[in-house]
Structure formats: C-alpha cells, structure tokens
Amino acid sequence: MSSEALAFLMFIAGLVLLMGIGLNMAFALVLTGAAMAWALDFWDTQLLAQNMVAGIDSFPLLAVPFFILAGELMNSGGISRRIIEMAQAWVGHIHGGLGFVAIGAAVLMASMSGSALADTAALATLLLPMMKQQGYPMHTSAGLIASGGIIAPIIPPSMPFVIYGVTTNTSISALFISGIVPGILMGVGLIVAWKLQLRCIDLPPGGPRLSLGERLRAVRKAFWALLMPLIIIGGMKSGVFTPTEAAVVAAMYALVVALLIHRELKIVEVGPVLVRAAKTTAVVMFLCAGAQVASYMITLADLPNVLTGMLGTMIDNPRLLMAAMMLPIAVKAGIDPVYFGLMFVLNGAIGLITPPVGTVLNVVAGVGRLPMHQVIKGVNPFLITYFVLLVLFIIFPQIVTAPVAWMR
C-alpha cells in the first residue's frame, strides 16, 4: 500500500474514530492531520503550528467574529424580539399561529446574523415559553424552532459560506446569492410541514386578530431591524463594501440601533456581549485552524487524485460524488463550485439538527429545559422536509445556479 493510500485511510478512520468517541471536531482535525504528516514522513511540529496560524490569518475570515457579534447585539438589543413581535402581529391569530411566527422570524433573522446557534437561542428563549403557555406540544414546538434555526447558514449573510469561500477560493458573493432561493424554499417547506402537523395537534384558538393599524405599528417598531438585511445585501451587490466589510457594517448597525434607537442595551452591558461573541469566535476560529492542518496534509498526500482513482468509473456520474464532499473531485466531475458549496453547507446545516450530535438540538433542549429525546422526536418531521428539498436541489441544480448566473 502506498503512503498516500495509507494517509487517506488514516484520515478517514481517524476522523470517524475521534468524532465517534465525542472529541471536538477541531481537535479531531488537528490529530488526523498530525497522523497523516507522520504517515507521509512530513512530521514537523513547527509545520503544524504554522498551518494552524495560516488557517485563521485571513482577511475574509474577519467576517466571522463580526457576524457573531451582530447576532449577539441583535439578541441583547431587542432587535430579534421586535422581529418576532411583528410576525406575531400578522399571523399570530390563525390556528397554530405561533408556529408560523417562528418560521417567519427564523427567515428574517437568518438574513441578519448568519449564525444558526444565535438565531436558535433567540427563537427558543422568546417563543418556547409562549408556546408552552398556549398549550403547544413542547416536542413539536422545539423541533420546529430547531429546524427554523438552521436556515441561518443558508440565507446570506452566512458564516459557513464565508469559511467555505475562504477555504476553497470560491466567490463569497456568489455563494451568498446561491443561498437566497434555497433558504426561502426551506421556510416554505417548514410552513407546509407545520400545516400538516397541525392536523394531529389539538390547539386552542389563536389570539385576537389585530387591526391593520396595530399590525402597521408592529412593522414600524421592527423598521430598523428590517432595514439591516437590505443594507447588507444592497451594499454588497452595489459594490459599496465586500462581504467582510458587510459583517463590520452589520455589527456597527446593530450596536447603534441597540444603544441609540431602541435604547435596550446599556453601555455597561456591551462588555458581556463582547465576551460572549469572543467565546463563540474562538470556537469557530480554532475549527478553521484545525481544518487548515488537515487541508494542508490532504494536499501533500494528493488525496483528491487518490480518491478519484479509488472511485474509478463513478467519476462519470457527478451525482455519485456528492458523498465524497471534496471540491477538487467535484470540479473534476464538472460540478459548479458555488453549487457544491451550497450543497456542502446545506448538508452541514441539516447535520446540526440530526441526532445524536446535533448542536442546535442541544441549544433548544438547554434553553427550553427539555429532555433531548423530546427534541429529537419533534424535529423528525421537519428533517424529512429538508431531505426532500435536498433531493430537489440535486435533481434540479438550476434552483441554485440560475440566480447566481442572473446576478452576474
């Protein structure tokens, strides 16, 4: 067996084993990268350290901490709450209205923060108590909120798109555009799934129908929140700022709105918000550092060509290569890098609500103080919806690629 084939087997087996025993993904990537370096006779601790630094020493990656900070400021400054109140004013009176509020709020918040964990935490904190009070089944409610939270990595601005674009040298702007239609379809799919769930749920009648004036007042209160995605997407499309600069604009905009307009965030509270954002950023950046180590060793081992040889004639069918999740092979098969990026991120987002490791499931269970098995039970119908959409995007890739081509 060649050293390259041995390195490939060590990479796959090591990653599966380390993740299987519950080791953090970043540590698993570093350790498998180190094992590959030993197998390839490239063992050098200095080389490993240099690659870890190189993994986070990137200007485009500055978008990650600022988008995380924007999400924290939205939650602390009342921006997220106003979005939910606006959605409730318009659809809260219908049967199962709080479920539709959760879906609408998830889509709107996804267009502002780009963080599944931040959006899910905000939705669960604000909506789960209301749904419990009105007699909604908690497992179904928790599953819906978790499923809505993972729309954030798909609709721009998306942190996973930024990381994927930097890692693979793919246009981040094109990736952002590619996520708009799939993100909206995810929201529509959740609406359909929720309506089907309502047939099996005995709920009390919705709240009173608000007058048009009250609804418009709710929209007016959420005006500054609704303006945020327009500024971000419009600025990037018009060339006023790059995706990285858009993250800074989003964070500063959220800070100004929270401090000076809504006045729900006090100066003394900014420090704890920065600390929470820094902790989340550290986790994400360490993952990027670990990914760079593994990526460097994959390049040295020439694993794309090794895997291509192992796949043999399957290279003639690009659809079979999606499981490989390696961009060089996808490009060799004629798959568009932007389309592959969208599918890569979408699969990862679905993984956030797939038991037993789903991070978003842990967030909902923790915020709602629910047993994990209840959340898993509630998320299953919505997982089926996402799998159907995933198949739809595979059969009709134009859903993803056409908007990108049109915007160009």
Image (tube, helix red, strand yellow):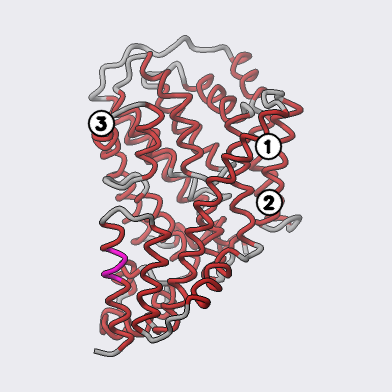
In this view, the residue farthest toward the front is 45
Find residue 254 and name its label.
Answer: 1
314 horizontally vs 98: left or right = left
Local SS, label 1:
helix
Between residues 94 and 107, which one lies in front from this camera angle? Answer: 107
Amino acid type assigned to the residue bearing label 1 in the image:
Ala
- Proximity of marks 3 and 2: CB atoms separated by less than 8 Å: no
Please state which amino acid type lies under the numbered disc 3.
Gln
Which label was assigned to residue 291?
A: none
Tell me, for residue 374, which label it has, or none. 3
Category of crowding for the residue at label 3, using alpha-carbon neighbours closer than 10 angstroms: few (below 14), some (14–19), many (at least 20): some
Closest to the observer: 307 or 49? 49
What x and y, as percent, mark residue 74? Answer: 61, 34
Rendered image quadrant of residue 56:
bottom right
Q: What amino acid is labelled 2 in the image?
A: Ala
Residue at image mark 2 = 246
Q: Secondary structure at mark 2?
A: helix
User: Label 1 to label 2, Cα distance in Å?
Assistant: 12 Å
Q: Earlier in the sequence, mark 3 or mark 2?
A: 2
Q: Residue at x 44, y 24 (%)?
A: 127
Q: CA distance from mark 1 to mark 3?
A: 34 Å
Residue 246 position, x and y percent, is 68, 51
Percent position of residue 408, x then y? 62, 64
